[in-house]
Image: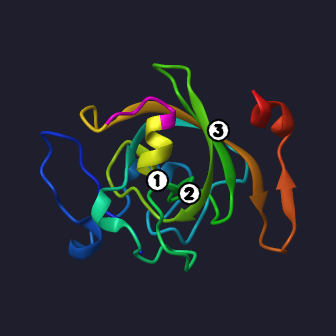
Amino acid sequence: MGAAFFAPGEAFIDAVTIGLVGNDEDAAVGGSGRGGEQEPPGQKRTGKASFYANHYAGKTMADGTPMKLSSNNAASITLPLGTTARVTNLETGRSAIVTIRDRGPYVRGRIVDLSPATARKIGLERRQGLAKVEVAPLSVPLSDGSVKIMPNAVAMATN
């Protein structure tokens, strides 16, 4: 399940419903915008983060687990499901560890959707709607079933 997200003042359009998922930025990093193709594992990305609306609580995410608003769930179009990453708010310097369990966001310039609890941890408040973040993968599941542990993953996870 991909989710649609919007910031205060933006019109709500469910890109999945109208079939307009993906964008030029996704194509530039090798993604189709639909989660089928993915960028090379371990690439850091900088962009905007948004967060899940409360009405997504309990809905099934792309990995089959229910959405828990209080957990460390996150959505990415380009990172493989099961990836563990550190998300850092570049305005506050605060960070949190997330697990990619869903697909999205489907809005140009956004690279990750966070659970509300994780958004609060990094200083992204509901009234802001968006924050500029860096997403740095720590461990990435590979197609052969192995897991790639990124250089400096232990140091990044404990800071």
Q: Secondary structure at mark 2?
A: loop
Q: Can residue 47 be seen in the rendering of this structure?
A: no
The N terminus lies in quadrant: bottom left
Asked if residue 88 lies left or right of residue 150, the reply is: left
Percent position of residue 69, x then y = 44, 58
Question: Which residue is depicted at the point 68% across and 64% down?
Answer: 82
The tag on residue 26 is 1
Please tell me which of labels 3 and 2 falls first in the chain: 3
Question: Which residue is depicted at the point 84% across and 74% down?
Answer: 145
Question: Which residue is depicted at the point 84% across and 62% down?
Answer: 147
In the displayed structure, 55 sits above or below 87; it is below
What is the distance, in whole Å, between disc 1 and disc 3 at their CAs? 14 Å
Per the image, the residue denoted by label 2 is 78
Percent position of residue 114, x then y = 46, 49
Which stretch appears magenta?
121-125
In the displayed structure, 102 sits above or below 97; it is below
